[in-house]
């Protein structure tokens, strides 16, 4: 069964790479949902916004999609700051984050998707770059650069964010804000301001997440919906707000999806994440590494 | 107003609606009216869980499509009258609601919402891979030209059935509001922890709400294959069902049965007009913007504008 070893080996390796990419699209929700307790279900829509910005920069200006994402990051940060401001004033201070806060983000998700449809139509779009196409080979194992670059970029982003969150004052304040806003106030940090910065950061990651998404697959405006289940499955399974847990969960989901796609056909892959999510919620809602 | 009297009024209103549609004597009026009525059922169903208990269900397309596809299956296997199909579709999606609720309603409300959101994607995956109901290519349904009942056109028959469903849904929603069940739901919405501590069986109540809500959504979906005559996963699971169904109660007001009805009539009609005069994408954009606008600026919805001002000290349910 040497053929089956080839299949398994490649499914595992590309699953790992896919998992690295999933970490890049999940990290924003890990911050907003995991640390700030804001259920931003519109995150996939902002990721697609990032994809389309990378697409325009690439097809019109001939810019590298990843470079374009870095340039767009500050704009995404301020978009996040603005959204959090509205959310804070309208829902958090009124204590109505459940019903209307969730519906607010659902509305944002939908508005962004319809706007993208109106602007770009429903055709699939893709980008061009030197690393899309060639493949590294180690024996029977293929390492396509198209998957390798997003995985590496995503790990780098995760590392930088982890250092920022654990070494700087604001970073630590972000980790503390969901646990005890009052104590934070006593440390002379305004919880609203800290959350605004954190939410800005979480949306800024969507810029890079979008660029790696369009490197990995061609996109159209409703692609984001496939990622809602994945993102929240990874986030919950990884234990809400823990980066190492999230990364491990992303790897597991990537491998599970790839193995499913290899042996049962790609049309079944979207069901895997939901299975993971339901299983996690039913068995251990605090995630694999969550505090009980 | 006592419940029986209210139901009499509802039936009178329904009869007037049907008579008016007959008077217009244009089959487009029935086609458009059917969609508005379908949204009255969907919005009312959503509000039983969302408005009364405060748990947000994003999986509307899943429940709706379970109803629709159960009709496709029945149509192929055991042909039966449409009202029976609606009952079967309602039971199937009610059970789906019970199952999802059982797995996720023990947790915080947000987990339930996320699970329902993901559930829509998975149901779509399942249906897309199920060749018996047409898979991704879709299924054609041949509907009879006329019905055995009073020589009605089939579209008039569908309209009448949806009218009856909306009367039932609204009557049930209002009956719940003024019952022990409704007060139980309200305690969950206002403070679940306190309710649990005072001995309210919160999980049981939430499961009842989830099953009822899912069941009515499935019933609203069951006649869909006969209405569209061609059903494919992409249109059955369209996100616009979810957005409309959530927007209508939130715009009309979630506190009572009247809110979803006002929202559905208003937004449903607006959309029918805007789809014809502008474009369907733009009309959806308008609904999305209205949803966001209302939750930010008018949290009590349209009925909140006319409600008497609350006295300090909170209201009594």
Image: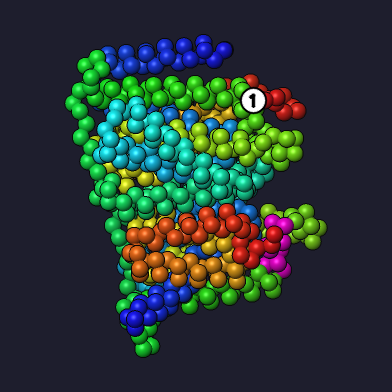
Binning the other alpha carbons within 10 Å of mark 1 as few (below 14), some (14 to 19) or many (20 upward) gives few
Q: Position of residue B214 (x, y in %)?
A: 47, 37
Percent of width and height locating residue A78: 55, 59
Q: Is residue B103 left or right of residue B265?
A: right
Residue B23 versus residue A184 in the image, above or below: above
- Tell me which corner region of the image, top left, top right, bottom left or bottom right, holds residue B185: top right
Magenta segment boundaries in residue numbering: A169-179
Residue at the spot of label 1 = B180
Q: Residue furthest bottom?
A: A139
User: Does the magenta-highlighted stretch encompass residue A266?
Assistant: no
Dot 1 falls on a residue whose secondary structure is: helix
From this view, report whether residue B32 is shown above or below residue B233: above
- Residue name at image x 39 percent, y 77 percent: A8
Q: In the image, residue B241 lies at what x, y percent?
A: 40, 40
Vertical comparison of B98 with A65: above or below:
above
User: Image quadrant of residue A287?
Assistant: bottom right
Chain identity of mark 1:
B
- Colour scheme employed for the rendering of this structure: rainbow
Place of residue B6 in the rendered image (x, y in percent of width and height, measured from the top left):
51, 14
Classified by dominant secondary structure, the portion drawn in magenta counts as helix
Query: What residue lies at 53% left-to-right and 38% top-to-bottom?
Result: B210
Residue B190 in view here: no
| Residue at x 57%, y 67% (from the top left corner) | A246
Q: Is residue A177 magenta?
A: yes
Q: Nearer the viewer, residue B214 or B59?
A: B214
Please state, as top left, top right, bottom left or bottom right, where the C terminus of chain B lies in the image.
top right
From the viewer's perspective, is A189 left or right of B146?
right
Can residue A230 be seen here? The reply is yes
Task: Tell me the quadrant of the picture where the N terminus of chain B can be found.
Answer: top right
Q: Nearer the viewer, residue B241 or A201?
A: B241
């Amino acid at each position: 069964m040497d053929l089956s070893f080839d299949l398994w080996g490649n499914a595992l390796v590309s699953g790992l790479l896919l998992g690295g990419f999933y970490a890049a699209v999940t990290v924003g929700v890990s911050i907003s949902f995991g640390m700030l307790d804001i259920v931003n279900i519109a995150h996939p829509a902002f990721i697609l916004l990032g994809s389309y910005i990378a697409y325009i920069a690439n097809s019109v200006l001939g810019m590298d999609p990843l470079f374009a994402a870095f340039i767009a990051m500050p704009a995404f940060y301020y978009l996040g700051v603005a959204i959090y401001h509205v959310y804070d004033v309208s829902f958090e201070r009124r204590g109505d984050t459940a019903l209307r806060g969730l519906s607010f983000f659902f509305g944002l998700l939908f508005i962004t998707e319809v706007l993208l449809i109106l602007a770009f139509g429903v055709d699939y779009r893709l980008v061009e770059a030197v690393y899309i196409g060639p493949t590294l080979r180690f024996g029977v194992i293929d390492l396509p650069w198209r998957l390798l670059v997003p995985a590496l970029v995503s790990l780098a982003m995760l590392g930088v964010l982890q250092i920022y969150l654990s070494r700087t004052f604001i970073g630590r304040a972000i980790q503390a804000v969901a646990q005890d806003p009052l104590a934070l106030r006593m440390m002379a940090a305004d919880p609203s301001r800290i959350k605004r910065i954190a939410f800005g950061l979480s949306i800024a990651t969507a810029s890079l997440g979008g660029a790696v998404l369009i490197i990995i697959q061609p996109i159209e405006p409703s692609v984001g919906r496939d990622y809602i289940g994945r993102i929240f499955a990874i986030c919950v399974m990884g234990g809400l707000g823990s980066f190492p847990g999230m990364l491990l969960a992303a790897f597991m989901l990537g491998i599970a999806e790839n193995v499913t796609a290899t042996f049962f056909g790609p049309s079944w892959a979207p069901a895997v994440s939901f299975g993971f999510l339901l299983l996690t919620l039913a068995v251990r809602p605090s995630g694999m590494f969550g505090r009980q | 107003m006592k419940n029986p009297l209210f139901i009499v009024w509802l039936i009178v209103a329904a009869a007037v609606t049907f008579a008016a549609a007959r008077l217009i004597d244009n089959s487009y009026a029935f086609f458009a009216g059917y969609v508005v009525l379908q949204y009255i059922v969907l919005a009312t169903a959503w509000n039983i869980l969302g408005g009364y208990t405060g748990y947000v269900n994003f999986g509307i397309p899943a429940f709706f499509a379970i109803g629709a596809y159960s009709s496709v299956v029945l149509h192929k296997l055991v042909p039966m009258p449409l009202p029976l199909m609606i009952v079967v579709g309602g039971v199937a999606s009610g059970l789906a609601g019970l199952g999802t609720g059982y797995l996720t309603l023990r947790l915080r409300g947000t987990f339930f919402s996320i699970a329902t959101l993901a559930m829509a994607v998975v149901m779509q995956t399942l249906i897309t891979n199920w060749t018996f109901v047409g898979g991704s290519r879709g299924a054609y349904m041949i509907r009879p030209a006329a019905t055995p009942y009073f020589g009605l056109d089939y579209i008039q028959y569908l309209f009448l059935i949806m009218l009856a469903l909306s009367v039932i849904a609204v009557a049930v929603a209002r009956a719940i509001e003024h019952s022990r069940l409704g007060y139980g739901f309200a305690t969950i919405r206002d403070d679940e922890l306190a309710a649990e501590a005072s001995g309210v069986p919160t999980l049981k109540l939430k499961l009842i709400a989830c099953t009822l809500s899912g069941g009515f959504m499935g019933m609203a979906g069951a006649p869909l294959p006969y209405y569209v005559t061609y059903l494919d996963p992409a249109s059955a699971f369209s996100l616009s069902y979810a957005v409309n169904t959530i927007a209508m109660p939130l715009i009309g007001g979630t506190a009572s049965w009247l809110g979803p009805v006002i929202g559905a009539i208003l937004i449903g009609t607006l959309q029918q007009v805007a789809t014809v005069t502008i474009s369907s994408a733009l009309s959806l954009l308008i609904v999305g913007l209205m949803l966001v606008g209302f939750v930010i600026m008018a949290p009590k919805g349209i009925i909140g504008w006319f409600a008497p001002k609350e006295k300090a000290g909170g209201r009594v349910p």
